[in-house]
Image (cartoon, rainbow, N blue to C red):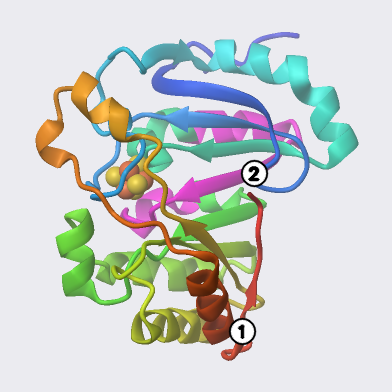
Amino acid sequence: MALDSNGGIKGLIMQLQHFSVNDGDGIRTVIFMAGCPLRCKWCCNPESWSLEINEYVDEMSISEIIDEVDRHIIFYRYSNGGITYSGGEPTYQLNFLENMVDIFYNRGIHQSIETSGYFIWEDVYGVFEKMDFIFVDIKHFNSRRHKQLTGVHNHSILDNIRAMGRLGKDIVIRIPLIKDINDDEGNIADTAEFVYRNIPNGKIELLPYHSLGNYKYKSLGLDEYEYSFQTPDEEDIQRVKEIINSYDVQTIEYR
Ligand code: SF4
C-alpha cells in the first residue's frame, strides 16, 4: 500500500495493543500515546507522563503504525472494530494525532478516543469531529478535589465535555471508581446529573481502581508519587450504579 505523504511523522508510543475488546466496539488496535498534563494519584501508566523515550516508551512513525493497522484491518471489518487512541492523553501529541486521524478517517476506519478531556477545545476540535466514539473521564465533579487528586481543576474538562455533547457522537463518560475517594452519593449524583443534562444518550462506565501499575513507579524513579487506594467492592459498585440509573443515565461495561 502506498504511504501517505505525512507517514514519516514520528510520535512517542507506549504500546500498540492489538485484539483489544475493552476499548470500544468490536476488535480494536489501541494506540497508547505518551504524554499527559495530569498527575492522577492512582495512575497506572506513569511511564506516559513525560514526552521522553524510556523503558516503556519508544518512537514510532505514522507509516509504521499504518503497517501494523493494515495487518489487522480484516479483524476490524468483520467485528465492526477499529482503532482507539489512548494514553497518556492522546491530544498531548496533537500534530502526530491529527495526522494519524486524518489518514485513518480517509480510509474509513472506525476511530475512538480515550481522553482526560483536558485541552483547549478549539485546538482539538478537528480531531473530535472525526471520531466515531468518545470515552472521556470525569474523575471527580468537585473542582477543588479534582485538583488535589489529579493536579488540575476540572472546569475546562466539564466545558469540553459539554462541547463534545454538542457534536452528537456516541459518548461514554468514565469514572475511575475509588473507594472513599469519589464513590460517595454526592459526587456520583452530580456527575450523573451533568451527563443527563449535557450528553444526549450519554452513558457512564465505572472503572474500579486497581493497583496493577504500582510496580512501575519504582522503576521510573517516581517513588514519591506512589499512593495506595482501595478498590470498591461489588456492593459499592452496585450502589453507585443505582444512583446513576436514578438520573436516567445508563451504565455500560466494556471491560
Ligand atoms: S489522565 Fe490517565 S494517563 Fe494521565 S495521569 Fe491521569 S490516569 Fe494517568
In-image side of 67 versus 215 (left or right) = right
> Disc 2 on helix, strand or loop?
loop
In the image, what residue type sits under mark 2? Asn
> Is 220 situated left or right of 191 in this image?
left
Q: Give the residue at mark 1.
A: 245
Q: Label 1 vs label 2: CA separation? A: 22 Å
Amino acid carrying label 1: it is Asn
Q: Quadrant of residue 91?
A: top left
Q: Is residue 229 left or right of residue 222?
A: right
Magenta-colored stretch includes residue 63: no
Residue 204 visible in the snapshot: yes
* Count of numbered circles on the image: 2
The label on residue 84 is none
Please tell me which residue lies in front, 159 or 85. Answer: 85
Instruction: Provide the secondary structure element on which disc 1 rests.
Output: helix
Percent of width and height locating residue 255: 63, 49
Check disc 2 and report the residue beneath it.
Answer: 22
Q: Which residues fall within the magenta stretch? A: 98-125
Quadrant of res 102: top right
Q: Quadrant of the N terminus?
A: top right
> What residue is drawn where x is 30% and y is 28%?
215
